Image: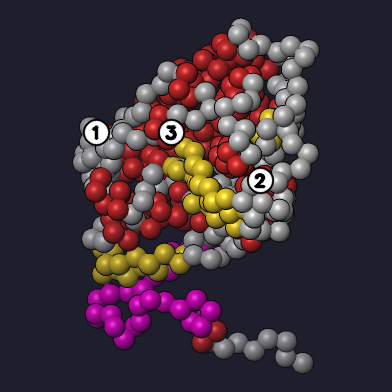
């Protein structure tokens, strides 16, 4: 009995190429980079037309992950959607929760009405998660271009953050901690002191990281003047986050929208300046991420001061006091956004005023826009540089295939 009969056309029919062999010049080849390849940062397939070592064209092929977030959200109550939000950008689940929950709180007219301790805890855990996300971005980027030690160093320090967040939530990566109207639970007793110890440990490590990677001559030669993304092109493609700031535009939703308690905190917005090459190259994008880690450390320190002084824990504090039992917003359309480690994460809500399930919930994923720019800035690059360009975008495919 034949269970499966091989047919050569099956692959072509299931995932057809944009380019056909008959259309290629005699020196050109069609290469498939991914979908199972570490340098594609997830299940992403890149159809590459090459002329020797030069990239002629790149076509990203999506749809290998099938996260189906938006269809799940149309069959679940608002509060039960939070675990699914975690699984989009699974490296920055706390930031994604924060963006989604603030959107639902706008629907319920709860914006600005929560206790300050809740807001400071939200910012604290979000910035810890931003550090963890950037550590993965910088460390795996080092792997992409041949620097192994840097990856081990940042993963060692990221492990401290994972343990801190696990102490708060019970989970290492997918938290369901930031709830609509509050938090799952208050910080554990002694957390502020342990977190302060970690920050004091991390500061000199950031200096070492910069010397090991960003200021490394080999790293500079591999990334400077490679994958240059002009500011106008980044804006036209909807790029956000470090990809856009790496091209020189000083925009950060934590400053622009001033949500939560960010207006009360002092931090800067790093941008690419072309110090080692051209503004908007791979080096600038990674340099911006490293500088943002320093800014996140400043924000965490300020939150810890507030949480141990003006807004310290009391026996009366209940982080679930304003959590609604049933979420039934009025009929409306609303868009809410926040600054995730990879850029602007937005949610479009449509509600009917009767149900506790959204009629429509559309996610605006920053990784999708940042991915779409790769063909434009890769043409004419070396094949080895294509890996460097993809890595500099810091993609997570769970967010793209939502």
Q: Earlier in the sequence, mark 1 or mark 2?
A: 1
Would residue 117 be visible to someone looking at this image?
yes
Q: Nearer the viewer, mark 3 or mark 1?
A: 3
Q: Which residues are magenta?
A: 11-37
- How far apart in space, not on screen, are marks 1 and 2 (Cα)? 45 Å
Residue 138 in picture, x, y percent from top left? 44, 38
- Dot 2, how many residues are within 10 Å of its Cα: few (below 14), some (14-19), or many (20+)? many
Q: Residue furthest top?
A: 309
**Residue at position x 36%, y 51% in the image:** 238
**Residue at position x 66%, y 45% in the image:** 329
Residue under pointer 1: 273
Tag 2 secondary structure: loop
Residue 315 in picture, x, y percent from top left? 78, 12
In depth, the one of 380 and 156 nearer the eye is: 380
Point out which mark residue 329 bears: 2
**Residue at position x 61%, y 19% in the image:** 116
Would residue 185 be visible to someone looking at this image?
no
Residue under pointer 3: 257
Q: Earlier in the sequence, mark 3 or mark 2?
A: 3
Point out which mark residue 217 bears: none
**Residue at position x 41%, y 53% in the image:** 369
Q: In the rendered view, how is the structure colored?
A: secondary structure
């Amino acid at each position: 009995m034949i269970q499966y009969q091989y047919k050569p056309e099956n692959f072509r029919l299931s995932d057809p190429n944009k380019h056909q062999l008959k259309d290629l010049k005699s020196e050109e080849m069609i290469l498939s980079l991914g979908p199972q390849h570490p340098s594609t940062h997830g299940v992403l397939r890149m159809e590459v037309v090459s002329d020797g070592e030069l990239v002629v064209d790149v076509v990203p092929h999506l749809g290998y992950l099938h996260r189906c977030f938006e269809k799940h959200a149309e069959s679940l109550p608002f509060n039960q959607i939070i675990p699914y939000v975690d699984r989009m950008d699974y490296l920055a689940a706390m930031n994604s929760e924060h963006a989604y929950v603030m959107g639902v709180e706008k629907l319920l007219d709860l914006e600005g009405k929560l206790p300050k301790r809740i807001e400071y805890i939200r910012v604290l855990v979000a910035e810890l998660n931003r550090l963890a996300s950037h550590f993965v971005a910088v460390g795996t980027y080092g792997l992409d271009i041949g620097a192994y030690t840097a990856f081990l160093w940042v993963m060692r320090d990221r492990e401290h953050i994972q343990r801190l967040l696990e102490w708060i939530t019970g989970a290492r990566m997918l938290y369901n901690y930031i709830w609509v109207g509050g938090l799952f639970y208050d910080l554990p007793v002694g957390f502020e002191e342990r977190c302060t110890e970690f920050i004091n440990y991390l500061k000199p490590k950031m200096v070492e990281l910069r010397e090991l990677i960003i200021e490394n001559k080999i790293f500079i030669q591999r990334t400077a003047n490679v994958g240059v993304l002009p500011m106008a092109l980044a804006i036209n493609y909807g790029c956000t986050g470090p990809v856009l700031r790496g091209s020189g535009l000083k925009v950060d939703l934590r400053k622009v929208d001033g949500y939560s308690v960010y207006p009360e905190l002092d931090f800067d917005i790093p941008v690419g300046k072309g110090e080692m090459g051209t503004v908007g190259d791979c080096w600038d994008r990674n340099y911006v991420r490293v500088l943002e880690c320093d800014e996140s450390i400043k924000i965490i320190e300020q939150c810890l001061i507030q949480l141990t002084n003006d807004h310290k824990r009391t026996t009366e504090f209940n982080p679930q006091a304003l959590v609604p039992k049933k979420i039934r917003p009025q009929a409306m359309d609303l868009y809410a956004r926040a600054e995730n480690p990879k850029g602007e994460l937005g949610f479009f809500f449509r509600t009917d005023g009767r149900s506790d399930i959204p009629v429509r919930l559309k996610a605006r994923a920053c990784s999708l826009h940042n991915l779409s720019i790769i063909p434009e800035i890769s043409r004419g690059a070396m094949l080895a540089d294509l890996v460097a360009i993809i890595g500099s975008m810091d993609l997570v495919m769970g967010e793209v295939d939502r």
